[in-house]
Image: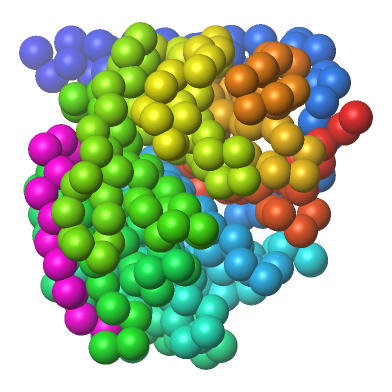
Amino acid sequence: MERVLLKALGVFIALILLAIVALNAYLSTRPAAKTMKAAGIVSIPTPFRIGRPFIDYMTISSSRLCAGYASGGLVGVVDTAANQAVATIDGLSRVHGIAVVADRNLGFASSSRDNVVGVFDLKTNKLLQKIPAGDDPDAIIFDEHAHLVYVGNHNGKTGMLIDPATQKVVATIPLGGEPEYPQADPNTGLIYQNLEDTSELVVIDPLIQSVIKRYKLDPGEGPTGLALDAAHHRLFSATGNRKLIVLDTETGAIVAVLPIGAGVDGAGYDPVLRRVYTANGIGTMTVIQQDSPNQYRVLENAPTHFGGHSLVVDPATHRVYVAYFGSIAAYDPQP
């Protein structure tokens, strides 16, 4: 019996290796991207752990990229000017996202295994304290207009507001669904939140600490990544059934539906180039041109790395970063 099990295990491992070889062979034969140019790869140094390395969300502030290294239980810090990792912040269990509050020199990192938000010093890269959060804190952002940190508790189906001055929770808001990525409007302070299980987008007013509007994203299903064009009042919601839903923030109307790649997770928007990007786990990045607030064109599904799922755009350089497993690939936009 033992020999049979060992033989079956050997066959299983051989099939996995064969699949990996076949996938890499396929990826190497794809034509080069027309809209994006590879600009290097950054790896985050982490302690060895059995299992797949996994970086979740990323954020950029002042030539500093912070990556939530979920499998490593730490925050990776990348100098975007040098394109290399410069620090790690540990002491957390399963980090997902980071919100940067620059005027207080603080970072806030969501950690789901211990249900806390870790607070760290941006200069020393030292963990200062842990704030108790809800069930499964996931994506986290800083609402500059309201001057509050917002975190979505995925399993708890709530949104939580933290005052960065006191580093205390000031509100927990029932959402009615599982939150994925949010965005905050810099002009109004309103928070837009994707709900993955109900395929909705809700609008949160941080002043009254409540959901004030709720929009269905049909024909999109299972929204994850969310990007915002604040100047033209447009949201870009990336959904699991390979659609990008463009929504008018003022009316809730869906103004466009675009095809995107399979396995999508993250989305980003460059307001200068007027490009929308989605990171697709199948190994592509969908590049979409915004001709007007209601008119869009898919330029291409640019080849990236298999497993690339999280994405962030550097507003200063227009460089796009895509996380795949334990590494971050950088891409420069081409005309």
Which quarter shows the N terminus?
top left
Q: Is residue 22 left or right of residue 15?
A: right
Front in this rendered view, residue 6 or 303 = 303
Please provide percent x and percent y for residue 97. 39, 57
Please provide percent x and percent y for residue 255. 50, 18
Q: Is residue 253 visible?
A: yes
Residue 253: quarter of image? top left
Which quarter shows the C terminus?
top right
Front in this rendered view, residue 229 or 78 = 229
Q: Residue at x 15, y 67 (%)?
A: 171
Front in this rendered view, residue 314 or 263 = 314
Please provide percent x and percent y for residue 9. 27, 18
Q: Is residue 301 visible?
A: no
Q: Residue at x 51, y 48 (%)?
A: 326
In the rendered image, the vertical position of residue 118 relative to residue 286, given as above or below:
below
Display coloring? rainbow
Q: Is residue 15 left or right of residue 323?
A: left
Residue stretch rendered in magenta on the structure: 167-178
| Residue at the limit of the structure toward the front, as seen here | 251
In the rendered image, the vertical position of residue 204 relative to residue 163, given as above or below:
above
Q: Is-magenta flag for residue 142?
A: no
In the rendered image, the vertical position of residue 211 relative to residue 170, given as above or below:
above
